[in-house]
Image (cartoon, rainbow, N blue to C red):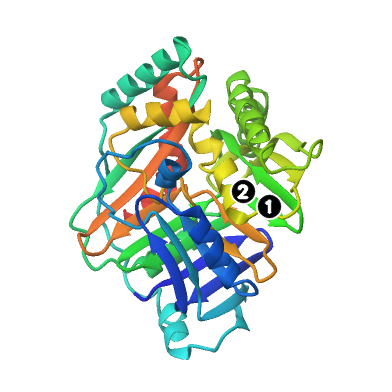
Amino acid sequence: MPNFAYLSYMDGKFLCLGVSDAFVGKGELDFDKLDEFIGLHRGKFVVSMLAYDVKNSVEKLTSKNKDAMDAPDWIFFVPKSVHSIKGDQRILVFGEENEVLLQALFENWSQEAHPIFELRPTLSKEEYVDQVKSAKVEIQIGNCYELNFCQNFESGNVLNLDTWRVFRRMLEQIEAPFSSYLSWDGRTMMGASPERFIKKVGSKLLSQPIKGTRPRRDNAAEDDAMKEELRNDPKERAENVMIVDLVRNDLTQVAKTGTIVVDELFGVYSYQAVHQMISTISCELRDDVRFSEIIRALFPMGSMTGAPKIAAMEIIERLENFKRGWYSGSLGLIQPNGDFDMNVVIRTLLYNENSGYLSCPVGSAITILSDPHAEYEECLTKIHKILALFR
């Protein structure tokens, strides 16, 4: 599969084909060079991918856990062509048509049987419960007060997986406003994310962290009851407000004084599989704030770390048994006018076609009120539709 990206947002979907220039790497990210690359291509579309482990370039942190994906930590590329997708229509907005690739992507893709195999957790339920208990000890002794702990479901020897077809099936099965696909040098992301990291429109920047989940029910009355339970649950509201406060604090580094606003607190939104609690925080950016300054202020997103952010990330590194990589990073698109929209990479399949490794990480926020068994079930609720794609 050639290098390309598909990105979905609330107000549009984009297919970015080919690569005319790229800034890609692993390890220490030089933020000045990143700004130079973006500045060099001002007036063009730029696809942006930041792995979670860019945290090590933002703060003095490390990532030493198992890295089966072996993917770049950052990818910024200028596509050769960009299509806006509206329903069944593909409208060329930049570059030249590539009819051969478009036909390969959109014709006759759904006629084959889907692959059948199982992604298995790398932690048993008992091991997961023990790690959550360890996280709660960290909270109890005051090292942090919220922690996003993740586990990984994986399968090896998955050869010749048609990742684009899997992703198209994912779009059919899972409602996701920030779904995304990235193919880069044999590594692939297939995502059905419901969460926005940050969006810039002119001088306004907003963030929409998700904290709080309930499963959908077939019965309308039971489904409404799930929504109300989520809306009023003290634990979920505590999780949410902690991250809202964290985002407000992060925004002070790039915002004009007095402009940070909580536009919505504890909003409950319903998707095909789950109800989610989402809050919106926004600000007016200071004049001439660079892209890298925004990233250094807000990345990684607090909803995937916990708070305080640095302490939470240090504990995460000790408790988790895999390198997150692209998972809980961000994929986005910088527009020619400098505006951008960036998602949170969750509810996502990651595939290394060279080794046949396929994974589906998932996490939840741990607080002092967390029930480890309930947290485990919440993880299964979040990804059960993704795992069902292969059954």
Q: CA distance from mark 2 to mark 1?
A: 7 Å
Q: Secondary structure at mark 2?
A: helix
Q: Which residue is found at the position 44% from the left and 27% from the top?
A: 375
The front one of 169 and 17 is 17
- What's the amino acid at mark 2? Ile
Q: Quick check: can you spot residue 148? A: no
- Return the residue at label 2: 294
Q: Name the residue beneath numbered marker 1.
A: 289
Q: Amino acid at mark 1?
A: Val
Which of the two labelled residues, at mark 2 and mark 1, occupies the earlier sequence position?
1
For image coordinates 50% across by 81% down, the residue present is 80
Question: 145 above or below 203?
Answer: above
Q: Sort mark 2 into few (<14), some (14-19) or many (20+) by Cα contacts within 10 Å.
A: some
Screen quadrant of the N terminus: bottom left
Q: Residues within 10 Å of mark 1 (few under 14, many from 20)?
A: few
Disc 2 + disc 1, Cβ < 8 Å: yes
